[in-house]
Every structure is written in C-alpha cells, then in structure tokens.
Amino acid sequence: MNTYSEIHNEFRPRVIVWELAGIHDPESFSTHESLLTIDSIARVAKPIVVFTGPNLMERPDLHEIIAYGRALGLRIIVEARPEELTSEVLRQYAAFGPKVFRLILDGCIVENFETRYKQTPEFRALQDGIQRLKTAGYEIHLGATIKQINIRELAYYHDFALRSAAKGLYCHLSFEPDDVTTTERSELDDVIESIARMKSLSPANMYVSPQCVKYGPMRLSDESDEDGENIEYGVRAEWNHWCLAGKTFAYIGREGKVRLCAGHPMVCGELRTDGYNFKNIWETSEVFMCLRKRELTCRGTREQFREPQATGPAGRPG
C-alpha cells in the first residue's frame, strides 16, 4: 500500500484560503497588492482560492480581482453572508459560474427543540439567501467556522446542509492553540474525525470536510505476540486524517502573512515584505519544507509548531 507521501509527492497548492478583508480595513490589501499576489499564485499552480473575511462583499474591486484570477486559470470562491447576496449581486457575478459563492452559516444555525432550528432573523436570512441562489441558478455551498469543540453543533450544520441539498459543507478549523488544553486535544481530533463520519452519511456528490486536511484509511503497524508471531496487519475501517498545510494548502491572513491555517498562528512568510511573491514563500518556507517531510495529524502539527508568530519551525523532526 502506498504511503501518503508517495501518493502526494508533488507539493503544489490546491486550496488557498485568503482573508481578503473589506477595503476600509487598515490591514486590507489594495487592488494592486491583490493582483500581484494572484499573479504569483498562478505561477506556482492553479489552485482554488477561497476569499473570506468581514465586509468582503463591500469591496468595489472584488469583481475585478475575481475576473483577473479566473483569467489566469484560478478557481475563485467567495464566502458571503446570506443578506449580502442580493439578486443584483447574483446577476453581476453570474458570468463566473454557479459555484462562485459560499454561504456562511456562522450565527445562523441554532438548535431548537420544537422547530429544529431557532427561527432567528439570521436563520430566515439564510433561508432567503439559499432561495435566491437556487432561483438564479447557483449551486448551494455552505461554510462554517469551527471555533469550539461542539460535535452536536457540527451535526446540525450537516443536517441543514442535507436538507438544503447543498453540494458542499466546508469547515474552517479556527481553534487558537492557547484555547485548546491538553485534555481537549484528543477532543479536537474527535471533531475532525466526526467530519469524516459525516462524509459516509452524505450523498456521493456532496463535499464535507475541512479543506486543510486529507482523510484516508488508518494503516496498522505490525503487531506480534510473545513468540514473535505476527497477529495483525492491515487497514482499519476507521479513517485517519493528515494536515495538508504546506503540502497542498495554505492560509493568507488579511495583513498578508502566509500561515498554516486559520487556527494556527505560525507565520511561514509575509507577502508585503517578500514582494508579494507567494511562489517564493511556498517553495522556500522552512515551515512548509519541514511539514513535507512528515505525515502529521492536525494535533500533530499543533504540537510540532507551538511557538506563535515564528518564522521558522519551533521544533524539528528527531
């Protein structure tokens, strides 16, 4: 059986999540900075670029940025709040295809014993947004920021995605390392593994996963009895996961710092001090290069790089 490294021996970004904040944010990239970065991304690969961030839809240059990225062969996805996707906006972006938007579930789905989902203004706006997308011919894609260890909440997100006939439920793992105690680290893995179980309960054409991890069968090592006889070897039915940071995934913060993911502060490079050269950061970052030598789970990556805001690995493989 091929190892994960053998299967994924070509390290090119396939998904980049980019917090492209609103134009009035003092740390936000200008139009020129954004286009320079997109140009550099396209020189290393043709990944999916997911734009996210507060007040993103207010940017007057958003349409121009997306058009430029698509002209270079990138797939662009924009995460938006339901109320931001008006019929006029959907008409404006229709030329980019039916998958350009992803509705954010944050704050919209709240459990209710009698009605299943609490009928808040945010929930009604979500339902209206989904209907507008369907009417305009867009696919339904949903995103959720996972900030706390709450598997029940995650299950409600999945339930809503199924009931909405969504084509995807994309989970952003945004745990701060200092907020996850030693006793909670195994529970954090439980959250990620719960998502894997949801995949088996989803339609074949529905994507359910964090985009920063890869799931696969868990391989057992050799186990021997007291006489040295092999007693078990093979593949378990359970699914394990691997961190894809530096292998096929990267995260760009609103200030232009390239990080492992939304939930890890480790800085792998800074676009503003490196001439907006994402390609150079991707290919030369010591952190990324270190990760490419190892097969780590999400928790393993957190334990490997514990020091926040460092430019190099806090610990190296032994």
Image (cartoon, helix red, strand yellow):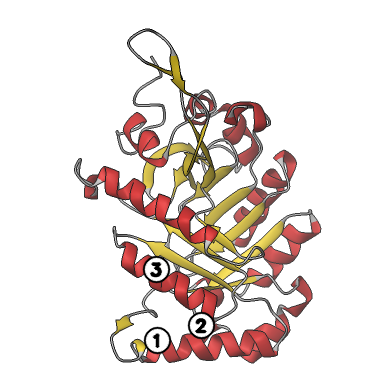
Q: Is residue 160 left or right of residue 33?
A: left
Tell me the quadrant of the picture where the C terminus can be found: top left
**Looking at the image, which residue is at 45% across and 52% down?**
255
Contact? badges 1 and 3 (CB < 8 Å): no
Q: Is residue 225 above or below residue 36?
A: above
| Res 24 visible | yes
Q: Is residue 90 above or below residue 233?
A: below
- Coordinates of residue 18 in the picture (x, y in percent): 54, 55
Contact? badges 2 and 1 (CB < 8 Å): yes
Q: Which mark is residue 155?
A: 3
Comparing labels 1 and 3, the label whose residue is closer to the camera: 3
Binning the other alpha carbons within 10 Å of mark 3 as few (below 14), some (14 to 19) or many (20 upward) gives some
Q: Which amino acid is tagged 2?
A: Pro
Q: Which amino acid is tagged 1?
A: Glu
Q: Is residue 306 left or right of residue 282?
A: left
Q: CA distance from mark 2 to mark 3?
A: 21 Å
Dot 1 falls on a residue whose secondary structure is: helix
Q: Is residue 13 above or below residue 76?
A: above
Q: Which mark is residue 82?
A: 2
**Looking at the image, which residue is at 38% across and 66% down?**
154
Look at mark 1 in the image and give the residue it sits on: 122
